[in-house]
Amino acid sequence: MTRFLPRRAATTIVCCAAALAALAAPAGAQQAGAEPTDGRDMVLFDGFEDTTFAPGGGLFYKKNREQGAGSYTFESEVVRSGKQAIDLSVRSQCKQVNGLCSERAEVWEKPEVLVLYGEPVWYAFSMQMAQPIPTERHRYVMAQWKREIDPGADGDFSPLLALRMIDGRIAVTVDTDQATFKATGCQPGDTPASTPDSFSQFRSLVALGAGGTSTETAKAAGFTGCTRDQRVTARGGEIPALTSGWIDFVFQVKPGPNGDGRIDILANGAWVATVEGTIGHKGDGLGSHMYFKFGPYRAGQDGEWRIYYDDFRRGPNCTDVAPEKVCAQVTASAGGVTSATP
């Protein structure tokens, strides 16, 4: 298994004076009427080695009602590298098992480090799920990328990219409200998709762990239709089973609601897939930035659900977040997407 070891803090955290100043600024420091900030050139890292989040990691634990179901601990028993990792868990908070109430223990990117929506950026993190691993059909999310939503926006916008659990298997999904959905007439090469909601938003299944995706498995998971506006290219790698222990993920994320989006998925050093095409949302009420958050998020459920994370990284290039031999698999691309190497 390839280990994604963090670079030394001196070379990882420091990007430029402007980046350091932005990290030091309080949340929400941008003044009204100012041009939106862009943190894309920042190189962020948090190995969760202290009693709080690293100053150069750009992360925080958001406090609200849903997050009240969760807790976080910097612990030393289950660790990917270094001496510590972060333990994120949720307990039952909803009055009954249902799909309308949410329980979360998510770590968020700080507002002042966010990347402008549509810019390509690389992320990496390691994840291990504690036993027992839920296997029932339910809403389970382990990481998600979303577009900012302005107050009063009309619509419930799902993540443009999410790492989910479907029937005990890791699934990668992409959402958009700009593509064409087909309920019937799907052809080889089309991407499995679920029925659009009242806001024309639908979800596509772009990767599935422990055996991959077939038409039958996609339909069984609720992806009964398809779209041609998102093209998935298999790269030969596979997403491991959740029972395999630590999994090292790397993602290149570039939203593109106009059709120029791209996502690259890597797991344990292997390039799994590339998704290209119409990715994400556009329209009134949506903000200028993309934000990332990770941790257990589920619809109301009984019992406790726990996940360990380690070695969060973000940067403008693949080699900011992963070893060169891993990044060398991902070729340079057209259309403004960054190359695999600086």
Image (spheres, rainbow, N blue to C red):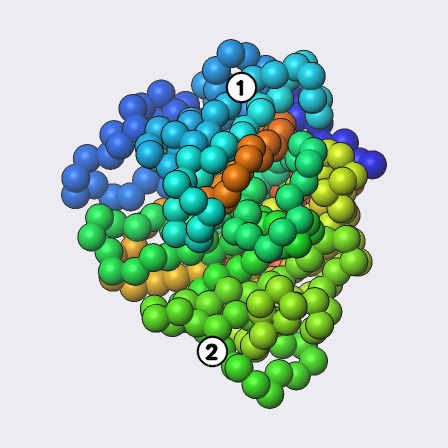
Q: Give x and y (percent) for residue 151.
A: 22, 48
180 lies left or right of 168: left
Horizontal arrangement in the rendering, residue 60 relative to residue 310 (left or right): left
Between 296 and 272, which is closer to the camera in this rendering? 296
Spot occupied by residue 148 in the image (x, y as percentages of width and height):
34, 48
Residue 35 figure quarter: top left
Residue 9: which disc? none
Task: Name which residue type carries label 1.
Answer: Thr
Q: Which residue is mark 1?
A: 73
Residue lying farthest to the left in this orientation: 33
**Which quadrant is the C terminus positioned in?**
top right
Badge 2 density bin: few <14, some 14–19, many ≥20, Cα 10 Å? some
Which residue is at the far bottom? 185
In the rendered image, the vertical position of residue 174 relative to residue 196, given as above or below:
above
Rendering quarter of residue 276: bottom right
Q: Residues within 10 Å of mark 1 (few under 14, many from 20)?
A: some
Q: Residue furthest front?
A: 96
Q: Is 253 placed above or below 131 here? A: below
In this view, the residue farthest toward the right is 1
Q: Earlier in the sequence, mark 1 or mark 2?
A: 1
How far across and how far down the image is residue 232, in percent?
A: 65, 66
Q: Residue at x 66, y 83 (%)?
A: 187
The answer to whether any part of residue 209 appears in the image is yes
Q: Which mark is residue 180?
A: 2
Horizontal side of residue 96 vs 27, given as left or right: right
Q: Tell me the residue at 58%/50% (across/down).
A: 164
Relative placement, left or right, of 324 versus 119 is: right
Residue 153 vs 200, above or below: the answer is above
Amino acid type shown at disc 2: Thr
